[in-house]
Image (tube, helix red, strand yellow):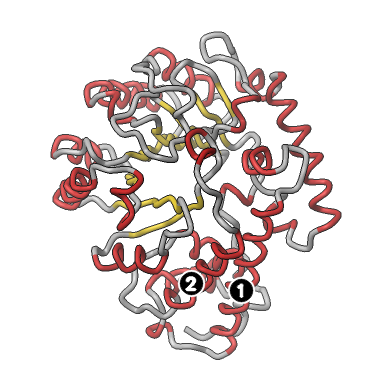
Amino acid sequence: MKKVEVILKVTDTCNLRCAYCYNSEKGYKNNRVSLEQFEKLLTLLLTDYNFIHIIWHGGEPLCAGLSFFKEAMNVERKICMRSSVTIENSIQTNGTLINSEWASFFKKYGFRVGISFDGVHNEKYRQQTEKTLQGMEKLKAAGLDFSCLAVVADEAYDLEENYRFFAEKKIAFDFSPMFSEGAAKDMPKMQTVKYANDCIALFDKWLYDTNGVSVRTFAYYMNMALGGNSRICSCASCHGKYISLSADGTLYNCGRDGVSAYPFGNIDSVQSVKEMFSSEGAIRLLKGSVERRKKCKESCEYFQLCQGGCADIAIMENGLENIPVNHCYLFKTLYKHISEKIKKIVDDQVPLDALNPTVKKVLAKSLTRMGGPMHNEIADGYVK
């Protein structure tokens, strides 16, 4: 099955003004992707892909309005009826606009919902905390699972305190360091070594928290350590696997700010997927990424795991064709520590019931994948 991830930045407008907002330099125009543009994109994609995962993004995507989303679902239904394509939907929202109607809509159409929320630091950087919490309650009332993504904006951010906050509320949680885009360019930079150490300290506690919640980043690193594929977009080549449509109709590789210097054309004029990926912007992005990956492959033992990493991260930190020092340090440090910890758990035959529920799931999947135990030095011999 050939799959594409579509980051649909349906509108630039937003009802919040987060202190680190990547969109701040572009402004918050009250614009919106048209249904005709949306249908054209899907029509083009179904000729090359048979699975389309749409990640509704923004701005704040809910500002586009519930009636627009209902009409968009009709477009998807029409596309699926005339083809064999499968379409799934996710949404990343600040959650402040979620009411019972929105929750029912997400439930009806099977949306996976991600809430951008900074936990105990939310009021400092995002505000309207109570509205977001109320939105989460509406999702719970509708029987919807969801997860939260928190931005680690400065060295005052306490990872362990925030993990406890989400664990007490039984909400799956993930975190990401702030990217130096938009308003974040004027904020103090985090110290990579401290951040890596904080991540390691939290992982060591999370590992044995039998009442704990999922932390997606840790689960991904564990999966890599056990021989599975990486699902971290910063550790994979995404060319041809992602496409982003902005509210003004411009196509990009993804929704991140750095790649905006490499447009793939405009949805109103392109006529095929091939045209998107053979555009001048796409070729420049690919050539620069290939140059960086050559350097990575020649100098790094972890290349097969991260494939030279994310183009946008490289652009922000050290230039598209150059190896990003801070990101690479963070990846290598976390992977080395997590893989060693998981290997010890396997070697010591630690009972699954002594582990975090997510750790149990990842280990179990690694042992049953492909119909039997994984053939790698970590998973081999582990007894459930």
Q: Position of residue 294 (x, y in %)?
A: 83, 46
Q: Position of residue 19 (x, y in %)?
A: 40, 40
Between 18 and 188, the residue placed more toward the observer is 188
Residue at the (27%, 37%) spot, across then down? 109
Check disc 1 and report its element: helix, strand or loop. helix
Q: On the rendered structure, is 363 left or right of 290?
A: left
Residue 20's image quarter? top left
User: Label 1, on which residue?
Assistant: 337
C-beta proximity under 8 Å, tags 1 and 2: yes
Residue at the (69%, 19%) spot, across then down? 279
Residue at the (78%, 63%) spot, across then down? 301
Kind of residue at disc 1: His
Q: Is residue 148 visible?
A: yes
Between 322 and 184, the residue placed more toward the observer is 184
Dot 2, crowdedness within 10 Å: few (<14), some or many (≥20)?
Answer: many
Residue at the (83%, 48%) spot, across then down? 295
User: Label 2, on which residue?
Assistant: 203
Between 218 and 362, the residue placed more toward the observer is 218
Vertical placement of 71 versus 93: above or below?
above
